Amino acid sequence: MADTLHPRCLKVLVIEDDHEMASFIEKVLEDAGHEVECARDGAAGLARARAEDFDALVVDRMLPEKDGLTLIREFRDAGGTTPALFLSALGDVQNKVQGLKAGAEDYLGKPFVPAELAARVEALGRRTTSEPQVTTLRAGDLEMNLLTRKVTRSGKKMDLQPREFRLLEYLMRHAGQVVTRTMLLEKVWDYNFDPQTNVIDVHVSRLRAKIDKDFPEPLLQTVRGAGYRLQG
């Protein structure tokens, strides 16, 4: 298993002025087991974020009363530390950079895949835990020591290249969850755009050959049309 067996229930504030979109986001996150509250404009959202402790904020960029960038900047300037995800139709690289520089931890463009939104919010939620820092990750009989960078499966040592190690670490931190190509590009390769290459496929194939070869049960799965999942 990874650092937690199941994603914990998060308290999420969604700041979105479009009623239909807000209801859809609320349903996606509630179906994932989270508690959701909605605010319909930037000023109300900022007030709620300041007044109560949330595990994550999901913020639209274009809001009435106070736009999303201003909202996050003011929240951070006032000492607010709740992790934030911008969810916006403004999904080009320049707008993503603006959102991250304003103080958000993550940025997802619309339209979005519901499973990806849920996975990203759960990743934000892990930033707020007060548990001791994790030094060992486990997924089934696969084990990764983050201090020594040693990876073993059923005691057999795996020799991984640095990028393969980083890829596996990300997959293990999200064990049991679907991880999309976009998430891997952003978090493992630090790309805010799709370079339209097969770099992910090549590295996943190499990693699969190392961690699944000679073992009866494969751990690394391809989820058609969605991404990849490492069995927990």
Image: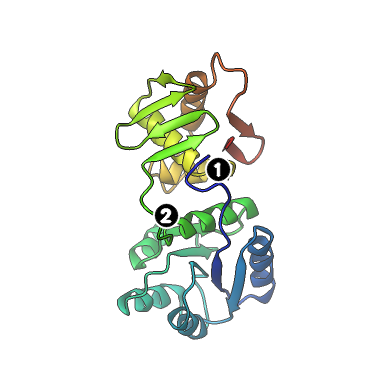
Task: Give percent across and percent down for residue 161.
Answer: 35, 25
Mark closest to the chain's N terminus, 2 or 1: 2
The residue lying toward the viewer, choosing from 9 and 181, is: 9
The answer to whether one can see residue 198 in this image is no
Q: Residue furthest top?
A: 214
Q: In the rendered structure, which amino acid carries the disc numbered 1?
A: Val
Badge 2 marks a residue whose secondary structure is helix
10 Å crowding of disc 1: few (<14), some (14-19), many (20+): many
The answer to whether one can see residue 103 in this image is yes
Badge 1 marks a residue whose secondary structure is strand
Residue 52 in the figure: left or right of residue 222? left
10 Å crowding of disc 2: few (<14), some (14-19), many (20+): few
Q: In the rendered structure, which amino acid carries the disc numbered 2?
A: Val
Residue at 61% of width from left, 71% of height from top? 36
Task: Give percent across and percent down for residue 120.
Answer: 52, 54
Residue at 69% of width from left, 65% of height from top? 27
Against 214, is 231 above or below? below
> Decide: marks 2, 1 in contact (CB < 8 A)?
no
| Quadrant in the rendering for residue 17 | bottom right
Residue 17 in the figure: left or right of residue 125? right
Q: Give me the C-alpha separation between circle 2 and circle 1.
A: 21 Å
Task: Give percent across and percent down for residue 60.
Answer: 52, 70
In the picture of the structure, the residue carrying the numbered disc 2 is: 93
Task: Give percent across and percent down for residue 53.
Answer: 46, 75
The residue lying toward the viewer, choosing from 4 and 78, is: 4
| Marks 2, 1: nearer the viewer | 1
In the picture of the structure, the residue carrying the numbered disc 1 is: 179
| Quadrant in the rendering for residue 35 | bottom right
The residue lying toward the viewer, choosing from 177 and 198, is: 177
